[in-house]
Image: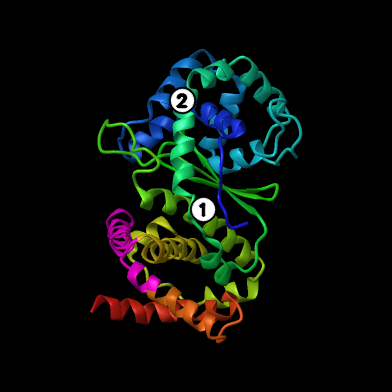
Amino acid sequence: MDKVQVRIDNRARLMSALLAMTSWPESEQKRKPHGAHAHARGTRRLLLPLEKHPAVLILQALLDRGMAPDMFYAYAMQLEWPSLAGGELPSWAPPTLPRHLSHFYQNSGLETWWQDEADVWQSALRESTRMFEQATFYDLLHPFVGDYTETLVFIPNVCYPTDTEIGLLVNGELCCIAPPRIAWGDNPPWPFDEDPTHIYRAALSQYGRVLIGRYLEHHPDALEKASQKKLPVSRQFAEKYSTWQEQFLALFVSGLVAIYLEDRVSAPEAQAFVLMEKKARGLDELPGVISVLRRYLTGYAEGQYVEFADYLPFFAQHLRVAKTITAL
């Protein structure tokens, strides 16, 4: 349960290849110009004859309507491979999607392409496996989200998205599909095992986000009471995360990552992460969030709180105080 399983999954690879033919790659570059992995660029070249395929057009239309790629991946990860059969068709999907998806794969040449690029994928698998040999997350997650029985899975992705992780809870597995860390300018991305902060942040952010999201759904009274007190966040942060729950989730997962890095990796790695979160996302509140989460963990260990729902209504208030103290 606590050991992270690392694997390559063809269903995820298929979705990444499909995403390569939409406007997503251009959108990534508009957010921040960077060098995509050579495999990702090669996948786009391979699939260029299928840029008007119905499966591509369906995904493009969904993206244009604001649908996150997570939902498309979640559907795909329920399907059987290689038939792509099974899986309950979600409400957003047209009834023709399964047929178009299967036709796309059968006519894409991806099977041969993946065989030709096997060394690239195996390198990503080896690098990622090395990083998770000693990683354990249950002891940190459990006080916040309670018991969970899902298997934690990490799926390295050298195709698209190249700048975004995807977290999914499907069929008893909690999956993080993540790219390597992007480099400066047009340089190729880093290997998965050269930046511990990146890979642990990617995985723990997605595991924590999905699990705490489910926990909040099961504790609506605590969430409602907590959300009555405004979170002390910057204007920049509030513009990016408009609702209380969105703000809380972003604060929570960043605080969780910082605690993990400090306790399990090194203090310098944690400090570098906090600094980057301040610069990249305007998260000036992160030191206060870390203090508040550690305060809860201490109270939980001492029996002051039975579960996180007992503490949640005090989160905003304690964060306001902690933010003031850490700013001194």
Coordinates of residue 306 in the picture (x, y in percent): 61, 81
Using the rendered image of the protein, determine whether residue 234 is visible from the camera's viewpoint.
yes
Identify the residue at horizontal 65%, vertical 66% (top origin): 147
Identify the residue at horizontal 43%, vertical 75% (top origin): 294
The mark closer to the camera, 1 or 2, is 2
Colouring used for the render: rainbow
Residue 119 numbered mark, or none: 2
The stretch of residues the image draws in magenta is 266-290
Quickly name the residue at label 1.
206
Q: Nearer the viewer, residue 244 or 153?
A: 153
Task: Answer above or below: position of 21 versus 46.
Answer: below
Q: Do residues under tags 1 and 2 come within 8 Å of each other at their CB atoms? A: no
Q: Secondary structure at mark 2?
A: helix
Badge 1: how crowded within 10 Å, few (<14), some, or many (20+)? many
Alpha carbons under labels 1 and 2: distance apart: 27 Å
Coordinates of residue 33 in the picture (x, y in percent): 30, 35
Identify the residue at horizontal 40%, vertical 35% (top origin): 27
- Return the disc, 1 or 2, that comes first in the chain's sequence: 2
Amino acid at dot 2: Asp
Q: Nearer the viewer, residue 127 or 204?
A: 127
Task: Answer above or below: position of 278 versus 315.
Answer: above
Q: Secondary structure at mark 1?
A: helix
Which quadrant: the N terminus? bottom right
Using the rendered image of the protein, determine whether residue 67 is visible from the camera's viewpoint.
no
Task: Answer above or below: position of 317 versus 106.
Answer: below
Q: Is residue 186 left or right of residue 164?
A: left
Q: Nearer the viewer, residue 19 or 258?
A: 258
Q: Nearer the viewer, residue 242 or 193?
A: 193
Identify the residue at horizontal 44%, vertical 32% (top origin): 123
Q: Is residue 178 left or right of residue 148?
A: left
